Image (cartoon, rainbow, N blue to C red):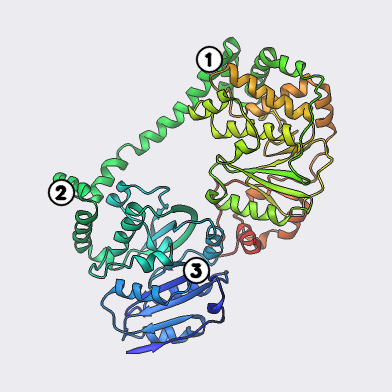
Amino acid sequence: MRKRNLIRPHSYKKNMKISVITISYNAVTCIEPTIMSVINQRYNSFEYIIVDGASNDGTLDVLKKYDQYITRWISEPDSGIYNAMNKAVKMAKGEYCIFMNAGDRFANPLVLKQVSLFLNDGFDYLCGNEISLKSGKVIDYVYAPTCITKDLFVNRSLSHQASFIKRELLLSNPYDEKLKLVSDWKFCIEILLLQHKKYRSIDVDVCKFNHDGATFTQKELGKKERMKVLEELLPNEYNQIKKHKQTYIDIIAEHCMESFEWANIYNVAAKKFTTMFTYIQVMGFLGLLAVLGKMIPGVLGLKIKHKAILSFLKKKYGYVVNNNANIVDKQVSIGDKFPIWVCWWQGENMMPLVPKICLASLRKNLLPNQQLYIISADNYKKYVELPEYIISMLEEGRISLTNFSDILRFSLLTKYGGLWIDSTCLVSQKMNDLSHMPFITSKQKISNVAQYVSAYRWASYLIGGNSLCIFQNMRDLFFAYCKNEKKILDYLLLDYLLEVIYELCPEAKSIIDEFPYDKGNMLKLAGCLNENLKDKDFSSMLENVPIHKLSWKIKYFPYDKEGHLTIFGKLLEIIQ
């Protein structure tokens, strides 16, 4: 038996966040890439533990080669992989553990830095995405499931190479050492499905998983063990599978494969038809013009559509702006600091990666006289009262969360003023003092403006100030519209309503016209994030424009296909 204990200096650090664990046995041909992927992580609050099963093929020589980078390692006989994993957990000091076993590796050197943004959100189990490899080639891309269900564990599992698990759970629920291949699957059923521990998926590519391992070379044993666990923990599901003589693989095929392509085609067509039908249903004859504009390609079609929608809104709801001509209401104080509003409906702890990065950048660049408020489903009623008919529309699905947030935005700005900044706005400089500005937005000089009715004179994702003639009119227009109509006319209804105010309220028009154009393009960075950092002047991109609009729906990569750091990767490096 050979034991070796080496302590990295940071292993004594209090509140160690992550323990990375590698289990190995006679892995001389594959363990070095695993070790390299761990020790090259650009994140400090982690330790690295290796438990080897008394290898005799040269694996120990590899461990000795890298022992200055390994926090602790031992090499001794064990009774199987799960015995080794349980031993490693007892050696670990981190709040979360991840198993990156020999042959598997982190997807890139910034995995732990990305995951660190999710570690303080109070979850017991975090699961990211897996890149599946076989014979060195990518064969699949496995997204982490968004929710835990029985079907999930009957049909598939969670990738433990992409999972960050609270160490206390691994200590209190050790892996079943009687099983050879599926004890990690059983562990997930026990803690997530039966004990209801807190789980969330994270939009981070965590690992490159090698499908040449034992789990995939001993499939029959794996199936037998799964059936045994199902019989023990999920007897109803076990009986169903046994009755129909289906394996979990058969069930996946039955539920998923047949209808996937046709469902996508149908959804795209249905969405277009629904939009055109809504125009007619809400606007009547003018709706036919909007449909015509939708069908005519190019600038002409857009102009026809815009004109039809604006004509309808001004004719039916222009009275709201006229009635508010002599606005005398005053905004109320929410404290002695200028309020900055960010909304994520599910709460900050459920933000995806890009909003988390953006929120961190905003916090870093706030002035002392500015106060951040994060609005969610749980707290919005603390700040504003919305009519019951609007809340009912949301609950019944007649307006989307996006539409609801538009109403919420102008209700907050009407009552308190401040700045509404989208959760995907990256702030790269200290914020300006905005407390005395009547209007704040992003205003850009762009030649092709026909696509949007706003013509880039304002941006809903960055808007604020103390101009009641804009904000109260917007709030009241939304209220009047929702009280009378059953459906939201257009996804960009906000822009159409603001254009109505612009055309009918001279004071609002003057305020918007007088607001200066941006010095740079705050949309530019989003299109460059996946580009090689060396090809761009990173500093000037951030210095010339203080706020950048990104998207959480676009896949950004820390490294390009050649392994070079991207602009997104650089943002991850500097984020705190």
Query: Relative to 375, is 440 on the left or the right?
Result: right
Residue at 81% over, 39% down: 517
Relative to 178, 300 lies left or right:
right
Task: From the image, state whether disc 2 or disc 3 is nearer to you.
Answer: 3
User: Of callouts 2 and 3, which one flags the residue occurring earlier in the amino acid sequence?
Assistant: 3
> Quarter of the image containing the N terminus?
bottom left
Looking at this view, is 104 or 345 the one in front?
345
Q: CA distance from mark 2 to mark 1?
A: 51 Å
User: Residue at point 34% right, 47% down?
Assistant: 149
Residues tagged 2 and 1 counted as in contact (Cβ below 8 A): no
Residue 281 is tagged as 1
| Among the two numbered marks 2 and 1 on one chain, the one whose residue lies closer to the N terminus | 2
**Nearer mark to the viewer, of 2 and 1:** 2
Q: Are marks 2 and 3 in contact (CB under 8 Å)?
A: no
User: Which amino acid type is shown beneath numbered disc 3?
Assistant: Ile
Which quadrant would the C terminus be assigned to in this image?
A: bottom right
Question: Helix, strand, or loop for circle 2?
Answer: helix
- Mark 2 Cα shell of 10 Å, populated few (<14), some (14-19), many (≥20): few
Q: Image quarter for residue 56?
A: bottom left
In the rendered image, which residue does mark 2 sit on? 242
- Is any atom of residue 538 visible in this view? yes
> Which residue corresponds to mark 3?
18
Q: Amino acid at mark 1?
A: Gln
